[in-house]
Image: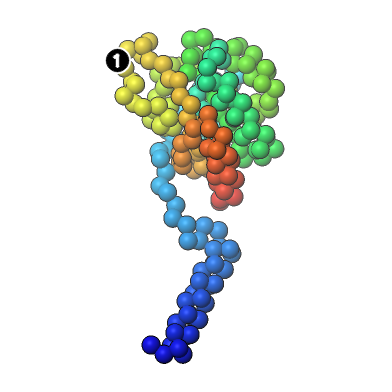
Amino acid sequence: MSKKRLFYIGFFVALALIFYLVLTLIIPGFGKVKSPPVSFVKPFSFTNQDGKVVTEKDVAGKVYVAEYFFTHCEGICPIMNNNMRLVYEEFKNDSNFIILSHTCDPDRDSVGQMKYYADSMKVDTRRWIFLTGGKQSLYDAARVSYTIDDPVNNLKSLDDQFIHSQFWALVNKKGDVMKIYDGLKESEVKSLIKAARRLLKEE
């Protein structure tokens, strides 16, 4: 093959690469293969720390993180919520982002107890919401909507079930669960923050 022909091939390959690079810079998401959603959030109705009902309609059009914890937990929950505070601090001034912290022990985590816990966290509860409700509804949401607990843990008796998951679900504005993150790992918390920023820019 002649040097002239090699030059033209190299020139056009370089030109194509430059053109592709320019497109990736000016068109958001160009060239990126989007992963399909993990799941979709089903309709729900829970009660927040102020005794007000919160449903899927209240989070429509917002990006949010869903987690499960219980207020008297002395194990992973304090670590998780310390990490969740990093997420809160990053987005606390953005009205299009919220955190939903569901209790996995509603028998003890009453509205009053959730209010006490929320106050102790000293956060804006318009941005970080603490939810309680019926155990069956809470557990169904964890397993079916957010997929942060394995359905095989759904034992015959509801009284014998207990969710103790360190996983968080990141949900986009359409109610799609885009990815599950480990709330105990700082690297995954940072990845979630980056992903949330991208989701907030989407129409």
* Image position of 166 with respect to 10: above or below: above
- Which residue is depicted at the point 54% across and 63% down? 24
Residue behind mark 1: 156
Depth check: 28 or 134 in front?
Answer: 28
Q: Left or right of 89: which side holds 54?
A: left
* Image position of 167 with respect to 39: above or below: above
Q: Looking at the image, can residue 25 be seen?
A: yes
Residue 166 % position (x, y): 48, 26
Q: Left or right of 144: which side holds 100?
A: right
* Image position of 101 with respect to 179: above or below: above
Q: The residue tagged with tag 1: helix, strand or loop?
A: loop
Q: Quadrant of residue 51?
A: top right
Q: Quadrant of residue 120?
A: top right
Residue 190 % position (x, y): 58, 39
- Which residue is depicted at the point 50% across and 38% down? 171
Spot the residue most to the left.
156
Residue 109 % position (x, y): 54, 13
Depth check: 82 or 4 in front?
Answer: 4
- Which residue is depicted at the point 38% across and 88% down? 1
Residue 100 % position (x, y): 55, 28
Depth check: 59 or 20 in front?
Answer: 20
- Which residue is depicted at the point 40% across and 47% down? 36
